[in-house]
């Protein structure tokens, strides 16, 4: 959403992929070389860098339309990141599960609504393998949250609550 509340979109899939990758790594700077290799793994290095430059130009224009008064894409020489104000559900999910409190775990299972970038493919081996790995890892994180959230009420003797959580966990993994 833009600062005025309207919904903006990022058109190209490679642009979406780049922003999704950066959003998963809040406050971490990623090199242009790494992004070029990840998103244009089937191209030669020169072509990959050129494609990245073109994509970044497009992203800058689209982001300026979405949030004209905010610099969302941070470029520091060879390194790229997103402004700290950009939120992403992946680090939030991980933080909630790490907190381990019953309240945090409940928030975490509410936040997890399915596979990471479900159905999103850009036909670049390195990026698509990254997505597959993250899907698996985040799926396990969500299941771990469910397991802990079943154990906590069991310790208190709240069998109905534990059963409800266990049934809910079957929606994300019936095994």
Image (tube, rainbow, N blue to C red):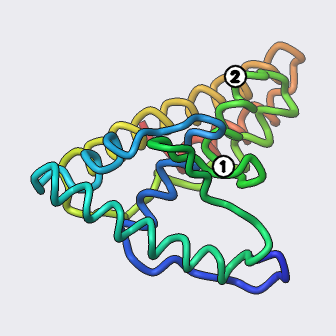
Q: Residues within 10 Å of mark 2 (few under 14, many from 20)?
A: some
Using the image, determine if residue 57 lies above or below residue 103: below
Tell me where residue 105 sits by quadrant.
top right
Instruction: Give the side of residue 137 with respect to residue 131, left or right.
Output: right
Using the image, determine if residue 126 lies above or below residue 96: below
**Of residues 134 and 13, which is closer to you in this image?**
13
Instruction: Report the residue at 64% width, 46% height from top.
Output: 168
Instruction: Report the residue at 59% width, 41% height from top.
Output: 169
In percent of width and height, residue 27 lies at 65, 37
Q: Which mark is residue 26?
A: none
Q: Nearer the viewer, mark 1 or mark 2?
A: 1
**Of residues 123 and 145, which is closer to you in this image?**
123
Tell me the residue that label 2 is attached to: 148
Q: Residues within 10 Å of mark 1 (few under 14, many from 20)?
A: some
Mark 1 or mark 2: whose residue is earlier in sequence: 1
Q: Which mark is residue 89?
A: 1
In percent of width and height, residue 93 lies at 67, 39
Residue 129 in view (yes/no): yes
For the N terminus, which image quadrant? bottom right
**Of residues 165 and 14, which is closer to you in this image?**
14
Single out the residue that lies furthest toward the front.
Answer: 77
Instruction: Give the side of residue 51 with respect to residue 150, left or right.
Output: left
For the C terminus, which image quadrant? top left
């Amino acid at each position: 959403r833009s600062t005025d509340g309207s919904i903006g979109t990022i058109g190209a899939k490679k642009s979406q992929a780049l922003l999704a990758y950066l959003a998963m790594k809040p406050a971490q700077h990623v090199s242009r070389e790494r992004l070029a290799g990840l998103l244009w793994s089937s191209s030669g290095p020169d072509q990959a860098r050129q494609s990245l430059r073109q994509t970044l130009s497009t992203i800058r224009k689209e982001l300026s339309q979405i949030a004209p008064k905010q610099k969302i894409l941070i470029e520091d020489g060879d390194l790229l990141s997103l402004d700290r104000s950009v939120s992403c559900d992946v680090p939030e999910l991980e933080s909630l599960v790490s907190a381990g409190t019953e309240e945090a775990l409940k928030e975490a299972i509410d936040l997890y609504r399915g596979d990471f970038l479900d159905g999103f493919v850009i036909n670049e081996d390195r990026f698509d393998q990254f997505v597959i790995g993250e899907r698996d890892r985040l799926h396990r994180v969500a299941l771990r949250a469910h397991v802990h959230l079943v154990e906590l009420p069991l310790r208190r003797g709240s069998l109905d609550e534990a059963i409800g959580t266990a049934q809910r966990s079957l929606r994300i993994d019936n095994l």
